[in-house]
Image (spheres, rainbow, N blue to C red):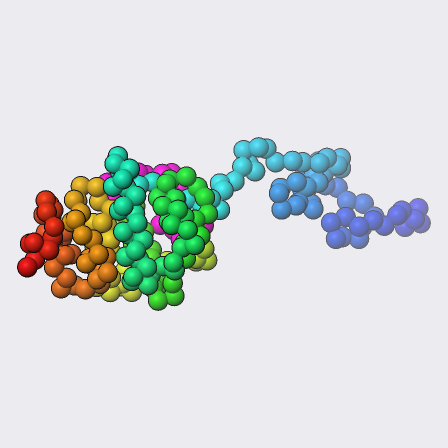
């Protein structure tokens, strides 16, 4: 009778009169804080600093473009922006500075929007090829995937080279030529920036052949 008079308690969901607990952790919060019972004694446990330190996966990385000539750097990035707009691959930036800052290497939200006319696989491929160039400095954490997710806000980007057309691969190669500091640009750039997708455009052939422009390109293509 005396045993039956003992108070019935709820321990971790069990209604019992007594319960021997050696090690038990209950009510663990998302951050890892919880209640631990050791030999019946209750203590609060907190995770160590090392166990709670998480890699910040939301950093809006930018691309670190290396070009010692500031004038050339700005000109080439502006040409790249114009080509991407003419291709209808990106929306017109609210500020040209946003596009320039995308290549500054310092984390920040640049507000550059890719259009729906370009599939995600092509954006992914373009960023992969861009980051592999010798004039792009490697930055820890800055990858095609992190740029897709945190800078351009694609929720689940995936690389799929099968979805990229041969024409788009060649266009991407042309875009990389524009910002390559080792390639001297022709005096007049309107011809190839306006017709970046024209595979028969002689202005683009001029750059792709690896020739150096020492005079107006029009004098060569007449």
Q: Is residue 115 left or right of residue 207?
A: right
In this view, the residue in front, 168 or 81, is 81
Magenta segment: 133-150
- Residue appearing at x 30%, y 55% in the figure: 82
Q: Residue furthest top?
A: 49
> Is residue 35 visible to the viewer in this orientation of the structure?
yes
- Residue appearing at x 25%, y 41% in the figure: 72
- Residue appearing at x 59%, y 33% in the figure: 48
Residue 167 placed where, x, y %? 21, 64
Residue 197 placed where, x, y %? 22, 63
Question: Is 149 part of what is drawn in magenta?
Answer: yes
Q: Quadrant of residue 157?
A: bottom left
- Residue appearing at x 11%, y 52% in the figure: 217
Q: Give above or below for 139 relative to 16.
A: above
Question: Is 152 part of what is drawn in magenta?
Answer: no
Total numbered labels placed on residues in the image? 0
Quadrant where the C terminus lies?
A: bottom left
Residue 151 placed where, x, y %? 43, 50
Residue 219 placed where, x, y %? 7, 54
Q: Give above or below for 50 relative to 214.
A: above
In this view, the residue in front, 189 or 138, is 189
> Is residue 205 visible to the viewer in this orientation of the structure?
no
Q: Is residue 93 left or right of residue 38?
A: left
Q: Quadrant of residue 132?
A: top left
In this view, the residue in front, 210 or 140, is 210
In this view, the residue in front, 130 or 56, is 130
């Amino acid at each position: 009778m005396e045993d039956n008079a003992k108070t019935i308690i709820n321990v971790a969901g069990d209604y019992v009169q007594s319960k021997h607990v050696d090690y038990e952790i209950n009510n663990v919060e998302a951050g890892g804080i919880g209640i631990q019972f050791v030999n019946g004694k209750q203590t609060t446990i907190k995770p160590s600093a090392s166990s709670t330190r998480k890699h910040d996966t939301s950093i809006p990385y930018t691309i670190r473009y290396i070009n010692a000539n500031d004038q050339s750097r700005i000109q080439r990035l502006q040409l790249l922006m114009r080509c991407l707009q003419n291709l209808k691959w990106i929306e017109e930036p609210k500020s040209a500075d946003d596009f320039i800052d995308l290549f500054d290497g310092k984390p920040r939200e640049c507000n550059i929007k890719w259009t729906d006319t370009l599939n995600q696989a092509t954006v992914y491929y373009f960023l992969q090829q861009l980051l592999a160039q010798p004039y792009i400095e490697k930055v820890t954490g800055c990858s095609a995937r992190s740029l897709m997710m945190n800078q351009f806000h694609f929720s689940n980007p995936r690389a799929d080279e099968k979805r990229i057309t041969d024409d788009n691969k060649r266009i991407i190669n042309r875009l990389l030529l524009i910002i390559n500091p080792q390639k001297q640009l022709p005096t007049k750039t309107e011809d190839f920036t306006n017709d970046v997708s024209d595979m028969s455009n002689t202005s683009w052939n001029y750059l792709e052949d690896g020739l150096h422009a020492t005079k107006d390109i029009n004098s060569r293509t007449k």
